[in-house]
Image (cartoon, grey):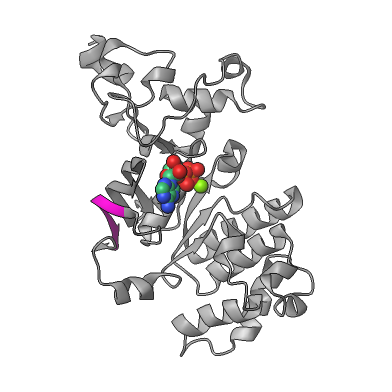
Amino acid sequence: MAAKTILEVKDLKTWFYTRRGIVKAVNGVSFTLDEGECLCLVGESGCGKSVTALSILRLFDSPPGKIVEGKVLYEGLDLTTCAMPLLRSIRGKDIAMVFQNAQSALNPVFTIGDQIEEQINTHMPHHDRNSRQKATALLEEMKIPEAAEALKMYPHQMSGGMKQRAMIAMGLSCDPRILIADEPTTAVDVTIRAQIIYILQELKARRNMSIIFITHDLSLVREIGDRAAVVYAGKVVEIAPVEHILNKPAHPYTIGLISCLPDISADLKRLPSIPGNTPNPIDIPSGCPFHPRCPSVMDICRTVEPEMLNISGVQIAACHLYDANVTGKR
Ligand SMILES: Nc1ncnc2c1ncn2[C@@H]1O[C@H](COP(=O)(O)OP(=O)(O)O)[C@@H](O)[C@H]1O
Ligand SMILES: [Mg+2]
């Protein structure tokens, strides 16, 4: 039986109105997330991964940011327009977020323990009064040594890796149905990283938790992802099961990203890495935003933006190369 869709992001656009111009950080992102699924959002720095994540719970800076178009449907409820008290009750409880920058997401004047317990007591007042015990158990799960003592620490007393793990513990504290984790393992060493990945996989299996895992690291995608959505210039340009993304990428951008991986199959390794830079989100190129860097660019790519095309049922990519009307192959 097909898994149930729990979250649907539809043509989402989040723009920042700045003095320099309109920063089109998220410019038409669409994807679905199933129950018990881990969807990875991948792409180079600045492509709009974090703003996409923040937009789901309306946590971006506003102003200057604004959702100008699109929907975020959680079990059918549009989170972009629902009343603020309802959204607040969903944040942390139904959908939890682990921020990319643990430093700024933690409150410097409260201990880690107070912050985790506050989260538990806000959302689970009747079910789980023993919040200190739960907070200790969460830190232990995150392999933070002497968890009971660590709860008494202030953020500035912790290392970057410890703060990141404390953030994940906080994210998991109310047993969310969806965990959005934005580059959650960048500041931790490889053994801890493996442990965090293991815990997330275990929670996904045991509690049927859904995960949106944001990373620029494709080796992590291979470890944790069920599907991956490749983001470029504020748009999803390809979405497919992870094995398709890694072994038979369709979009030239995805092919470029995979070719930058050191340990991928020999034939892909020979491809050059991606020339040029990511576009400025104030001035996104016309047509296909990847066209100035694309090794397969055609005339049409400069003017007409490609739609998402079905490559193989489960694999979808926005590229004119797969449009039979353009290539005349059929
Ligand atoms: N508060 C903001 N004001 C203006 N621009 C922003 C703001 N937040 C993010 N951006 C811009 O949005 C774009 C996408 O950023 P982000 O989602 O953080 O990228 P990623 O997470 O993929 O590295 C970047 O160009 C970034 O500078
Ligand atoms: Mg980011």
Q: Quadrant of residue 130?
A: bottom right
Frontmost residue, 133 versus 208: 133
Is 130 covered by the magenta stretch?
A: no
In the displayed image of the protein, which residue is found farthest to the right?
Answer: 146
Tell me if 127 is positioned left or right of 184 in this view: left
Q: Which residue is painted at 65% across and 78% down in the image?
A: 111
Magenta extent? 66-76
Tell me if 8 is positioned left or right of 127 in this view: left
Residue 223 position in % (x across, y down): 60, 44
Residue 6 position in % (x across, y down): 34, 59
Frontmost residue, 271 versus 210: 271
Q: Quadrant of residue 232?
A: top left
In the displayed image of the protein, which residue is found farthest to the left?
Answer: 325
Can see residue 318?
yes
Frontmost residue, 191 versus 234: 234
Q: 35 above or below 255?
A: below
Which quarter of the rendering shows the C terminus? top left
Tell me if 40 is positioned left or right of 87 in this view: right
Q: 321 above or below 13?
A: above
